[in-house]
């Protein structure tokens, strides 16, 4: 967007480009000029990968399009702020009682206050346009984060359902073995009854998990713009995320610069600061300058000015209101920054701890549970133990598998939330790359804010 303010040229990056940089995916976001249908006609592959789901979500998400629409509204407001109000032409005819030629009075006036306020209003409108762009980036990050968590949940439930189906097959073989041992007189009816009771428990759990799986897939179908679709795609296997090397302090520093919610509030604060500087013009409201002409016998023309007399209203209330609005936004900005730091630290610690726990389960717990089940199966077949030990070993292995899948899901969700907290996957990738190439580089150099332009620092201090 190219905006003109007097003789000064300002360039404001389109929010589509800012959002693409934040998520690390160029050219994926386009504003749609026409209303979107409820059901998109995009063809989805049999195997729905996350990049393809992300592409469809960025293309079809109505929240993103609504945010981009608000940017267009702010753009129109910024254009409107650059326009001077139309001059007012007034014409009056008066006919003398004694007859004769009519007296004609004409005037052309311009609102003086609008001329004086125009540079400040343009600056405020530009800041609000930037704030709307940052809010659009935030909407994109919300959509990406929601998609990521839904996608991971669907993957986890696919794994859980597959694991339960395997348990069901193992239980069927166990029932056959218990029945065969009973017929040979080596087993008991209790063993067979216990195995069949376990079958019913497994089938009940399968039904619950399949319902959860279907619900997650329907939610995923809505996110990609196909709420009425079959949602029967295959999803790829879980891809283990990489460990993080950057400490949470550096993540927090980057988030305070690149998080769009912080940027939006900073630009709003800058706009309020520009409006506060205009409050001293409040006593001039209603002032005008122009040209008046009058004709009686001959035409007479001369300049005119209309000024209000500041007897009752000196503008003190409006100045106080503008100052209070700046203070309110400043306090809200502090609250947002504190929340950002908390979100970074919570997600960072959750991700690191979950990865460590996941590695422990993979390296230690799973091999032990599998070895125990093998030993229990051998002892049951040879008649050394009853079915109870075998069922306990199988239950422990199932719990270990479930624990592994849940930890995989938690690790992925923690990474998604960490990337959302820092301002997007693109920002996170920049941070990790900078740490690997230049370990001492400061995270504060990753972006620009109103303070970097010197437009809001003065009002923030006030």
Image (cartoon, rainbow, N blue to C red):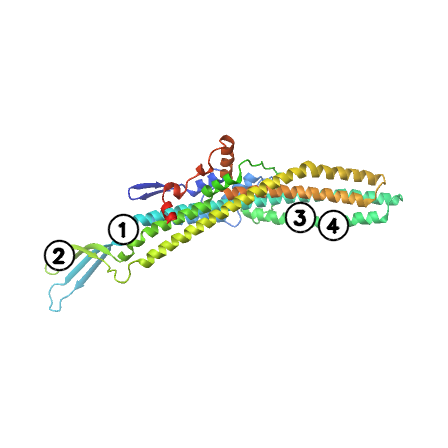
Between the residue at mark 4 and the residue at mark 3, the CA separation in whole angstroms equals 14 Å
Residue 238: which quarter of the image? Answer: top right
Neighbour tally class for label 3: few under 14, some 14-19, many 20 plus, Cα within 10 Å:
some
Which badge, 2 or 1, comes first in the chain's sequence?
A: 1
Figure quadrant of the N terminus: top left
Name the spot of residue 51 as percent of width and height, x first.
55, 39
Mark 1 = which residue? 116
Mark 4 = which residue? 201
Residue 286: which quarter of the image? Answer: bottom left
Residue 103 appears in the figure: yes
In the picture provided, is 377 more to the left or to the right than 449? right
Between the residue at mark 3 and the residue at mark 1, the CA separation in whole angstroms equals 67 Å
Viewer-nearest of discs 1 and 4: 1
Q: Compared to 9, does 300 lie above or below?
A: below
Q: Residue at x 73, y 39 (%)?
A: 369
> Which mark is drawn over residue 210?
3
Viewer-nearest of discs 4 and 2: 4
Depth order, front residue of 276/384 = 276
Q: Residue at x 78, y 50 (%)?
A: 197
Which badge, 3 or 1, comes first in the chain's sequence?
A: 1
Residue that lies at the very extreme toward the bottom in this rendered image: 97
Viewer-nearest of discs 3 and 1: 1
Name the spot of residue 327 as percent of width and height, x first.
40, 53
Q: Total of numbered circles in the picture?
A: 4
Q: Residue at x 63, y 41 (%)?
A: 408
In the picture provided, is 107 more to the left or to the right than 38? left
In the picture provided, is 402 more to the left or to the right than 148? right
């Amino acid at each position: 967007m190219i905006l003109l303010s007097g003789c000064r040229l300002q360039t404001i990056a389109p929010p589509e480009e800012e959002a693409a940089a934040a998520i690390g995916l160029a050219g994926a976001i386009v504003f749609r000029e026409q209303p979107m249908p409820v059901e998109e006609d995009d063809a989805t592959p049999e195997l729905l990968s996350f990049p393809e789901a992300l592409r469809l979500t960025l293309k079809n998400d109505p929240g993103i399009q609504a945010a981009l629409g608000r940017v267009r509204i702010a753009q129109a407001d910024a254009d409107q702020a650059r326009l001077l109000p139309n001059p007012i032409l007034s014409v009056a005819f008066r006919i003398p009682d004694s007859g004769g030629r009519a007296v004609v009075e004409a005037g052309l006036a311009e609102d003086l206050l609008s001329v004086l306020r125009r540079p400040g209003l343009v600056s405020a409108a530009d800041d609000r346009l930037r704030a709307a762009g940052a809010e659009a980036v935030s909407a994109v990050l919300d959509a990406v984060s929601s998609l990521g968590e839904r996608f991971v949940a669907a993957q986890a439930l696919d794994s859980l359902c597959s694991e339960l189906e395997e348990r069901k097959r193992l239980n069927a073989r166990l029932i056959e073995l218990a029945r065969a041992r009973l017929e040979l007189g080596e087993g008991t009816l209790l063993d067979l009854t216990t195995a069949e009771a376990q079958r019913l428990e497994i089938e009940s759990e399968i039904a619950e998990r399949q319902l959860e799986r279907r619900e997650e897939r329907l939610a995923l179908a809505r996110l990609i713009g196909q709420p009425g679709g079959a949602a029967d795609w295959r999803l790829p296997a879980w891809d283990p995320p990489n460990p993080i090397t950057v400490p949470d302090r550096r993540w927090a520093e980057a988030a305070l610069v690149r998080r769009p919610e912080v940027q939006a509030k900073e630009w709003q604060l800058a706009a309020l600061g520009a409006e506060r500087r205009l409050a001293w013009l409040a006593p001039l409201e209603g002032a005008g300058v122009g040209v008046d002409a009058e004709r009686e016998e001959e035409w007479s023309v001369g300049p005119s000015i209309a000024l209000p007399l500041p007897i009752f209203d000196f503008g003190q209330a409006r100045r106080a209101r503008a100052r209070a609005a700046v203070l309110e936004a400043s306090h809200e900005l502090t609250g947002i920054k504190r929340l950002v730091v908390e979100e970074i630290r919570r997600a960072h610690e959750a991700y690191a701890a979950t990865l460590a726990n996941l590695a422990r389960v993979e390296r230690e717990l799973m091999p032990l549970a599998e070895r125990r089940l093998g030993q229990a199966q051998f002892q049951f077949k040879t008649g050394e133990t009853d079915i109870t030990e075998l069922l306990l070993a199988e239950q422990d292995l199932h719990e270990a598998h479930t624990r592994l899948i849940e930890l995989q899901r938690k690790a992925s969700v923690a990474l998604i939330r960490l990337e959302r907290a820092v301002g997007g996957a693109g920002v996170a990738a920049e941070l990790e790359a900078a740490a690997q190439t230049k370990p001492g580089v400061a995270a504060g150099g990753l972006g620009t804010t109103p303070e970097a332009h010197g437009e809001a620092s003065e009002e923030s201090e006030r």
